[in-house]
Amino acid sequence: MAATHTARDTLIDLLHGVERFNTEVFPQNRELFASLAESQSPDTLFIACADSRVNPSMITQTQPGDLFVLRNIGNIVPAYGEMLGGVSSAIEYAVSALKVSHIIVCGHSNCGAMKALLDPEASNLNRMPTVASWLRNAEAARAVLEASDAGPASVRSLSEQNVQLQIAHLRTHPAVAAGLARGTLTLQGWFYDIASGEVVVLDETSRTFIHVDEAIAKLRAQQAADTATP
C-alpha cells in the first residue's frame, strides 16, 4: 500500500524545489539575477486572482523582473477610498514609483470567488466574513448578470463582467487617472481559461472579449497610426 503524502512531505518537496533552484536554475540564469539584484523596472502591473492554478509568468512567458504582480481573491481592485490598503498601495507604488506603462486585470475560469458571489450558501460564505466583505467589491458585476445558477457558463460570464468592473475601479485611483490623462499608462482586461489555455482580451470599444491575435492586430494598427501621425 502506498504511503500517504503528508503535510511534512509537502514541505520537504518544496525544499527540494529550492535545492534545484539553487543548484540548477539559478546558475543557468546568474546574469539575469545579477541584473535584478539592486533594482527592478517592470513595464507591467499584472493583477490576478490568488488561485493556485493561475501562473502569470507562465501565461505571459515572461522572466523575473518583467511583471509587478498583485494577487488577491477574485482579482479585485476596490474603488479608491473604499478599502485603502495592500491593493491600493501596490497600484500607487507600481504607477508612481516603478512607472509601469501597462496594467492588466486577469480573471479566469472556475473562479471560486465568482462561484461564491453566485451561490454564497453553497460556498459557505457565511463562515468567511472577511471574504464576504472583500467580495462586495465585485457585487456590481453580479448585479448586471442575469444568472440563476453557478455553472461554468455563469461563472465565466461573471468573471468577464468582474474584469470590466475592476478596470472601472482602477480609473478611480489618482495615480492611474493621472497616468491615463498623460497618456503614459494603458489598462487592459484578460480572461484566462484554465482547461484550454486560451486567453481572451477585453476590447473596450465593443465591451466584448476578443482573441489574442485580433487584439495584437488592433494594437499594431494603432501603433502604425500613431507613427504616421505628424
Image (cartoon, rainbow, N blue to C red):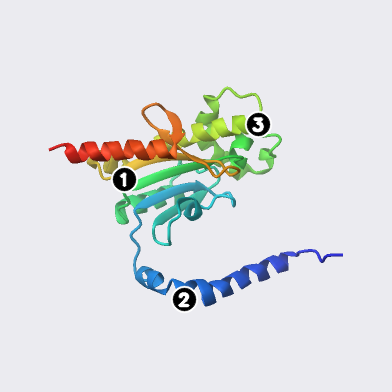
| Residue sitting at the far right | 1
Query: Mark 1 is on which residue type?
Result: Ala
Q: From the viewer's perspective, tell me whether residue 59 is left or right of residue 111.
A: left
How far from the left and from the top, in percent, is residue 203? 40, 32
Tell me the tag on residue 150: 3
Q: Is residue 208 above or below residue 191?
A: above
Q: Which residue is mark 2?
A: 27
Does residue 115 appear in the picture of this structure? yes
Between label 1 and label 3, give the one nearer the viewer: 3
Query: Mark 2 is on which residue type?
Result: Pro
Mark 2 or 1, nearer chain start: 2
Q: Mark 1: few, some, or many residues within 10 Å (few <14, many ≥20)?
A: some
What is the secondary structure assignment of the residue under circle 1? helix
How far from the left and from the top, in percent, is residue 171? 36, 37
Q: Marks 2 and 3: in contact by CB < 8 Å?
A: no
Residues at marks 3 and 2, CA–CA distance in whole angstroms: 47 Å
Mark 1 or 3, nearer chain start: 3
Query: Mark 3 is on which residue type?
Result: Ala
Residues at marks 1 and 3, CA–CA distance in whole angstroms: 36 Å
Residue at left offset 30%, top offset 53%: 99
Q: Which residue is mark 1?
A: 175
